[in-house]
Amino acid sequence: MARLTDYTSYADAQAHFSKDALWALFDGDRARLNIAHECLDRHPRERTAVRIARAGGDSVAYGFGELADWSGRFAHHLRRRGIGRGERVAMMLEPSLAFYAALFGAMKAGCVAVPLFTLFGPDGLRLRLDDCAPSLLLLAPEKAALADVVDIPVVLADDSFLAQLADEPAAFVAETAADDMAMYQYTSGTTRALPEAVRHRHRAVVTVMIAALYGTGVRPGDRFMCPSSPAWGHGLWHGTVAPLALGVTIAAYSGKFEPGRLLQALMAFEISNLSAAATHYRLMKNSGLASGERFAIDKLTFTGEPIDSDTAAWAEATFGSAVRSIYGTTEVGVIIANYPGAADCPVKPGALGKPVPGVELAVRTPDGRSCDPDEVGEIMVRRGGVWVSTRDRGHVDADGYFFHDGRADDVIISAGWTIGAVEVEDVLLKHPDVNEAAVIGVADAERGQVVKAFVVSPRPGDDGFATELKDFVRTRLSAHEYPRRLAFVETLPKTPAGKVNRRALRDAENEKPQQETT
């Protein structure tokens, strides 16, 4: 019987998709299912599961069998420590043997895996640990200093720890219900006042397969790479969990991003399917290092932010395939895609794509009316008989392609990372010389948007103070989540309710000169 992975066209996707066909891709069923088993244990042990391109220039690879064994050892280690089902296990690690062992080992043991971004500072880390209350935190050796700022058990995932794990039994039978909690995932910032985990059950691997099939276009035999951090949704679900569940060999990037190193990895690993943030493509283009090189890529996708036309044209000319959009949010998942590999779904410049199978979408007005073709409204998805907002504005053309027309909230998307204004403001306000602070996103040629902070302070607003504030946020919150631009103002615009009016700041950004450093 044909499986969903046997079809590639848009027409076949609409004709053959069903929830039953989706579940047929897995060993588990609606009652019993485990992500670690689906991603590792059931695949040929000798097949390469993960290749890791390290920033320093070297690479390492692990087979499905190796990772199945190491995750089993980690599951036994958790049991030996007395960490039981449902308890959270946090890991602040780059892609590595320790990361994959911990990620899948925690879920294999019935615990809840909590991957955390490695650039978080002490404040950013504490906020998330306070929210998820883990029983154990794994840190990379270079992050050892963070162990002093948390009050939970910490393990440094160094060579000695791996040597200890090697003494544990490799075999571990994963027994979880499909509805058991599997993973807490943090966005890099949201409209919420402070971070709160999006909680995923083991059955989430079935849902995310929709994005793999029609968003990134993953099929058995692909050599797939996603250079995004596996702490974020793109790198975690689309770059790691979904393709591994199909038995596809993936490639990951570890360490500080360098476009030249990514280009080297694409060639060395003979990658045929690349999914990256729009900023990754821009940085590769701007590096000038791809000229004259030959690549094996036939499917390209991007997510996280719009891609500019120059970069899209460069990607198609360089890799020989049009780059296709993936659209969704952490809360609702991928809902619009461009169906990579589907000859009957051509890319339209600027379009997000068409709805994925099984999803009902519409662009609606504030009064609840469905918009006419090309009329701008809010993109909404129907869930449980109720229209749920994506907080994005958009329109649909006569051919059914969706287009993005801007954010409907205060979320900032910078270099593919989602940054919450309130979280940055919260750290700025901890500085003794900051009386008030407001944060917005402003346009940036390389990153799409960058964070700009408006600060009210009794201190003179000179360059030295601006640098001090930037470093204050960067070291406490995250190395990606700080104001790259900063303006000192006498007052902040307020709403009638006394709240900071960020919309007024955005509206005035290009009209009113400010004292600014960049």
Image (spheres, rainbow, N blue to C red):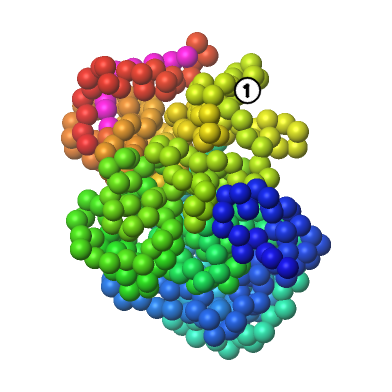
Q: For this rendering, which residue is in front, 28 or 210?
A: 210
Residue plotted at (70% across, 58% down) = 22
Disc 1 marks which residue? Answer: 370
Please identify the residue farthest to the top as the structure is shown. Answer: 496
Mark 1 lies on a secondary structure that is loop
User: How far across and how far down the image is residue 344, in percent?
Assistant: 52, 48
User: How far across and how far down the image is residue 453, in percent?
Assistant: 33, 31
Left or right, 460 with respect to 198, comes to left
Residue range (magenta): 486-495
On the question of residue 107 being in view, the answer is no
Residue plotted at (18% across, 35% down) = 463
Q: Amino acid at mark 1?
A: Ser
Where, by quadrant of the figure, is residue 269 drawn? Answer: bottom left
Where 35 falls versus 504 (above or below)?
A: below
Please identify the residue farthest to the right as the structure is shown. Answer: 31
Labels in figure, total: 1
Q: For this rendering, which residue is in front, 62 or 107?
A: 62
Residue plotted at (30% across, 22% down) = 509
User: How far across and how far down the image is residue 346, in percent?
Assistant: 46, 45
Split into 4 quadrants, where in the image is the C terminus?
top left
Left or right, 416 with respect to 249, comes to left
Residue plotted at (53% across, 29% down) = 398
Magenta segment main secondary structure: loop
Q: For this rendering, which residue is in front, 476 or 218?
A: 218
10 Å crowding of disc 1: few (<14), some (14-19), many (20+): some
On the question of residue 293 being in view, the answer is yes
Split into 4 quadrants, where in the image is the N terminus?
bottom right
Where, by quadrant of the figure, is residue 383 drawn? Answer: top right
